[in-house]
Amino acid sequence: MKLELINVKMHKILIYSFLFFTNLFFSQTISEVRYYLDPVKTDPIYLIANAKLRVTIQSGRTQVNVRNTYEIRRSKVIAQVNGDESYNVSKIAEISGNELLILDKDFISNNYYLNGIKKTDKKVKFIKGLKLNNTYTYPNGDFFAELSYNIRNKKEIYTLRIPKDYVEIKQKSNWYFLDLLEGWILSDFCTVN
């Protein structure tokens, strides 16, 4: 009886090991996926103007990113704000071109790379308004991009395929300079008072 139990356990271990190493060997890396795709190119035009207005973050919004610059490619998140908070604005940046790609609606996936490691088990919900980074396109128009979450001061980068119907390409966007935080926020998250 004991010998049969050991044989069953060994068989299970061998099967799980085979499945693990097969998945590891045959799954593509992020670089291999990108090799066959076209990178998204952008040539934005920036117009900056002085302003004197007050804005309120839209109700229900949480952890909206405030960046050190309106130039997306070079920007870093310096703060986060929440709904119903008000701020004075002293500058407005208008950006023309297709520099900004964002999720247009919530999106759930269980097929992604988390910090470069392929995952297919746990479903993750990506919320409307997330910015796509390091973006590539498939021939059918779908996107392969990075979506970042800052959770408890730990940055998690999800890289995945996103259907084109879930992505908004902003041809024009406005950014407000929040005096108190000395940073820029996308106007889509604000209401002018």
Image (cartoon, helix red, strand yellow):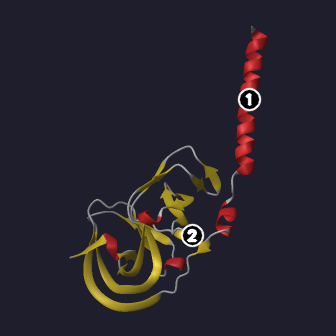
Q: Is residue 187 left or right of residue 98?
A: left
- Residue 1 position within the rendered picture, expressed as x and y whole percent measured from the top left: 74, 7
170 lies above or below 18: below
Please state which of residues 80 and 147 is positioned toward the viewer in this rendering: 147
**Residue pictured at 62% horizontal, 70% vertical:** 37
- Say whether disc 1 or disc 2 marks the residue closer to the N-terminus: 1
**Residue at the limit of the structure toward the left, as seen here:** 193
166 lies above or below 71: above
12 lies above or below 73: above
Label 1 element class:
helix
- Residue 102 position within the rendered picture, expressed as x and y whole percent measured from the top left: 43, 69
Please state which of residues 90 and 12 is positioned toward the viewer in this rendering: 12
Residue for badge 1: 13
**Residue pictured at 76% horizontal, 17% vertical:** 6
**Residue pictured at 53% horizontal, 44% vertical:** 122
**Residue at the limit of the structure toward the top, as seen here:** 1
Q: Is residue 172 left or right of residue 68?
A: left
Q: Is residue 68 visible?
A: no
Image disc number at residue 139: 2
- Residue 39 position within the rendered picture, expressed as x and y whole percent measured from the top left: 59, 75
Label 2 element class:
loop
Image disc number at residue 93: none
Question: Label 1 sits on what residue type?
Answer: Ile
Neighbor class of circle 1 (other Cα within 10 Å; few <14, some 14-19, many 20+) is few
Q: Is residue 75 visible?
A: yes
- Residue 117 position within the rendered picture, expressed as x and y whole percent measured from the top left: 65, 53
**Residue at the limit of the structure toward the front, as seen here:** 140
Q: Is residue 104 left or right of residue 28?
A: left
18 lies above or below 94: above
**Residue pictured at 33% horizontal, 73% vertical:** 188
Question: Label 2 sits on what residue type?
Answer: Pro
